[in-house]
Amino acid sequence: MIPAFLNLGNFEVLMLLLVFAIALLLPVIAILNLIRNKGLSNATKFLWILLIVFAPYIGAILYLLIGNKRPAPLYQERIS
C-alpha cells in the first residue's frame, strides 16, 4: 500500500523535479557567473565562493542579487 503523500500526479512530480533542478543549479550558476566576473578582485571572489559553498542557496541568491554589479552584455553593448 502506497502512503497518501507519495500518491502524486504527473503535475506534482513535474513541479518537484523543476524545484529540485533549480535548487541544484542555482549555486552552480552563481559560481560560474562569479568566476567570469572580471570586475571583482580575487579576494572578493574567494569570499563569495566560500559563502556559496558553505551556505549554497543563501550565498547564491545574495551574490546574484547584490554581488553581481556588472550590466548584462546586451545592455552593456547598448550603453557604449
Image (cartoon, grey):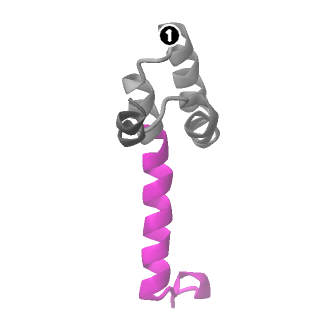
Identity of the residue drawn at 45% across and 27% down: 34
Identity of the residue drawn at 50% across and 85% down: 8
Tally of marks: 1
Observer-nearest of 23 and 43: 43
Neighbours of disc 1 within 10 Å: few (<14), some (14-19), many (20+): few
Q: Is residue 7 above or below residue 39?
A: below
User: Which image quadrant is residue 38 in?
Assistant: top left
Q: Is residue 65 above or below residue 10?
A: above
Observer-nearest of 67 and 11: 67
User: Which secondary structure lies at badge 1?
Assistant: loop
Question: Which quarter of the image is occupied by the C terminus?
Answer: top left
Residue carrying label 1? 41
Percent across and percent down for residue 79 are 43, 34
Give the overall secondary structure of the magenta segment: helix
Percent across and percent down for residue 22 are 47, 56
Magenta-tinted stretch = 1-28
Percent across and percent down for residue 68 are 54, 31
Q: Is residue 22 above or below residue 56?
A: below
Observer-nearest of 29 and 20: 29
Identity of the residue drawn at 56% across and 14% down: 44
Q: Is residue 48 left or right of residue 30?
A: right
